[in-house]
Amino acid sequence: MNNLQWTEIIVFAVLFLVVTVLGFVAARWQAGSTLDHLDEWGLGGRKFGSWITWFLVGGDLYTAYTFVAVPALVFGAGALGFYALPYTVILYPIVFLPLLRMWSVSRVHGYVTPADYVRGRYGSRTLALLIAITGIVATMPYIALQLVGLEAVLRTMGFNGQGFLGHLPLLIAFIVLAVYTYQSGLRAPALIAFVKDILIYIVILVAVFYLPSKLGGWETIFNTAQAKFAATPNPNDGVLLSPANQLQYATLALGSALALFLYPHSLTGALASRGRNVIKRNMVALPAYSLLLGLLALLGFVAIQAASKPIVNQATGRPDSNTIVPVLFDQQFPAWFAGIAFAAIGIGALVPAAIMSIAAANLWTRNIYKEYVKKDATPKQEAKQAKLASLIVKFGAVLFILFIDPQFSIDLQLIGGVIILQTLPAVAISLYTRWFHRWALVAGWIAGMAWGFAMLYEIPNPAANKAHFGGSALPLGQLSLFGWHPFAGSPTQIYVGFVALIGNLVVAVVVTWIMRARKVSNGIDQTQNADYHADEGDPRLKEVAAH
């Protein structure tokens, strides 16, 4: 750590201090009568309006890892990295109506988590437990990945040592995050998201206009990128998709769109909103972030033209590809503006990490602690348990970075998408129909998980010298159905999560037929059709923070 960039560090520290103050002030912002209730601590009082929800959900979905990983993927692989664009374009029309129904039924019955809803819809503790565990497991590496984005910034500013001292700034940042999230709950990331998004928009808009003009224009940038990819041994790399990865591109975009609002932190932002009209406006306005994301992805090509090189991680001895954009900013911007850019990315790690830890804590408290440990827990005890759980989740994520190769956590995030997709039948489809039997949903979940992990196990990553769990793209030639290879020899790749979801649904359909034929009880549905259409002001809505 001999090459500390002091101007960048000072600007970064000042802006970080500002959001820290906001994090503590947030405890009194739009405060209810108490924070000792999950409605208030974990969902911000369920009263966020259109603007707050837009910044909160946008800050939740477009994370620090997104801002460093998408252009890094474009830098390394080319066109495939742009899958994030169709993914975020088709996302909002897909979730528009289901999200409205989830908000309504949750407000009528006081549901805080998707597992709460599944418990009420099917009367099944087992199915709700599976949904809760799946959400927590899929969220943990996602939180760790926010640290990867923050560490990329810290590494670029000169904090690239080995051992504990190399991670000390990261640890301090997350201790501060843990304290103000513990105190303020969801209000903290909601308030900080305003600062984060304003900074991000400023930085990206300056970057996409200033850097190309400095580096010879977009034509030169694209020509240089194409020349680089033409010289690489991988035929699938390039500024255009290859025949082998077009199916992967499409299924990865669709699968990611189906998965995103199944993550508990995504639903947390929506359930915190005041009414259905707020969600409608946000589903219309949130695609503005997709424009930002598209511009951001182009910075991967800009980094090729600028001859940017990833910084070698002193802890592992390997180049850290996530540092590509920070290095580009460090080389091309004045130090003071690079400091602003790094603060935007760093704060962009804190907002989603806070929301994710709160969502995971809500799942633990409502669907494991209260369901199996202390059934008579009071709202105050629930809130205390959630606060403690949010601390454990955050520091569990820190341990990923301290003791595990960060590349492993990135692989886990790819696995996380496959995992969370297996909750789609129980959480999303059930918003419209209760045709699936509850035990069929359990069987489908098991089948989807098992097949998904079996396929992921077979995927190598030669670049990282890994024989297994090397990504989420499987060549169709390796797709096996009980030893039968229907596409033997095909090099065309497909997203594993999409295939596993199909297997999940097939098993769920077959087992449902069997359960119905045997007249096995499908549990008691506590919801009614009208519950899925209730809106703000409806007398059926459960009072916020009601005991």
Image (cartoon, helix red, strand yellow):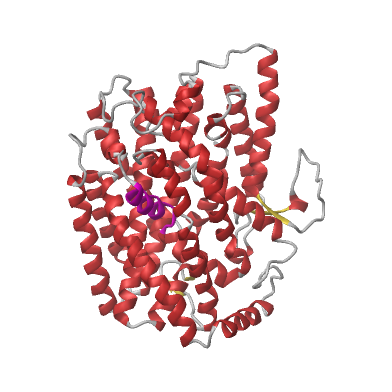
Q: Is residue 76 visible?
A: yes
Q: Residue at x 34, y 70 (%)?
A: 342
User: Which of the two residues, 105 or 437, is positioned nearer the viewer here?
Assistant: 105
Q: Residue at x 29, y 61 (%)?
A: 195
**Left or right: 258, with 346 as reference point:** right
Reply above or below: 216 against 351: below
**Left or right: 381, with 224 as reference point:** left
Dominant secondary structure (helix, strand or loop) of the stretch shown in magenta: helix
**Left or right: 415, with 154 as reference point:** right
**Image quadrant containing the N terminus:** bottom left
User: Which of the two residues, 389 or 103, is positioned nearer the viewer here?
Assistant: 103
Q: Position of residue 7 (x, y in %)?
A: 26, 79
Q: Residue at x 55, y 29 (%)?
A: 430
User: Which of the two residues, 173 or 359, is positioned nearer the viewer here?
Assistant: 359
Q: Which residues are magenta?
A: 50-63
Q: Position of residue 243 (x, y in %)?
A: 75, 63
